[in-house]
Amino acid sequence: MDGIDRKILALLQEDGRQKITELAPRVQLSVSRCHRRLRELENAGVIKGYRAIIDASSVGLGFEVLVFVTMSQEDRKTLTKFDAAVAAIPNVVHAQRLFGDPDYLLRVVTADLASYQRLYMEHLAELPGVQRLNSTIVMEQVVEPRPLPA
């Protein structure tokens, strides 16, 4: 990956909808060379996909909770089941396995506290291998999800 690839990535993170005919001159390449580099970045898995950034509160999901998960069992089978179960919950919009305690961090969005309580009781509390869940309500987004640094 060279400076041109990094510039392509930076520009696409700013606006993933720009056309190749707009992108090429900004990185000082012909359209065909820019297109080839873009496809190479996609094929290599550097670019994983394209999506719109949605304002959660505008679609009725303005209540956000960070859930810290401590596992009672950490064998491969339990972790695999846990990972699959978490991935199947649409309200979990981000999940990370951590070193140390806690074992996982989940970012969960719902409509309100009552919706979160239902999700907690019906899904989160039933996740395999869980010893403890610790929920922290997000007061405010200080830094919105943003592009990776160039």
Image (cartoon, rainbow, N blue to C red):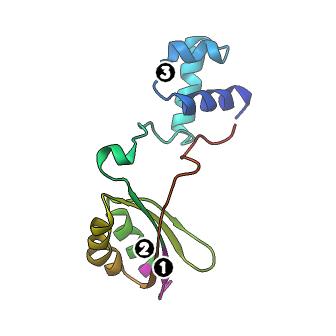
Q: CA distance from mark 1 to mark 3?
A: 42 Å
Residue name at image x 52 percent, y 52 percent: 141
Which of the two marks, 2 or 3, is nearer to us in this view? 3
Residue name at image x 30 percent, y 57 percent: 111
Find numbered disc 1 in the image and state the secondary structure of the residue it sits on: helix
Please state which amino acid type lies under the numbered disc 2.
Thr
Residue 47 is situated, as x and y percent measured from the top left of the image, at 53, 38
Instruction: For the residues labelled 1 and 2, say whether their Cβ atoms are less than 8 Å apart.
Output: yes
Q: Which mark is residue 80?
A: 2
Q: Quadrant of the C terminus?
A: top right
Please state which amino acid type lies under the numbered disc 3.
Gln
Instruction: For the residues labelled 1 and 3, say whether their Cβ atoms are less than 8 Å apart.
Output: no
Residue name at image x 49 percent, y 29 percent: 16
Give the residue pinned by disc 3.
Answer: 18
Q: CA distance from mark 2 to mark 3?
A: 38 Å
Q: Is residue 33 above or below residue 100?
A: above
Magenta span has 113?
no
Bin the neighbour count of mark 3 within 10 Å (Cα to Cα): few under 14, some 14-19, many 20 and up.
few
Q: Is residue 108 left or right of residue 100?
A: left
Q: Which mark is residue 76?
A: 1
Find numbered disc 3 in the image and state the secondary structure of the residue it sits on: loop
Q: Which residues are magenta?
A: 68-78
Residue 40 is situated, as x and y percent measured from the top left of the image, at 56, 31
Please state which amino acid type lies under the numbered disc 1.
Arg
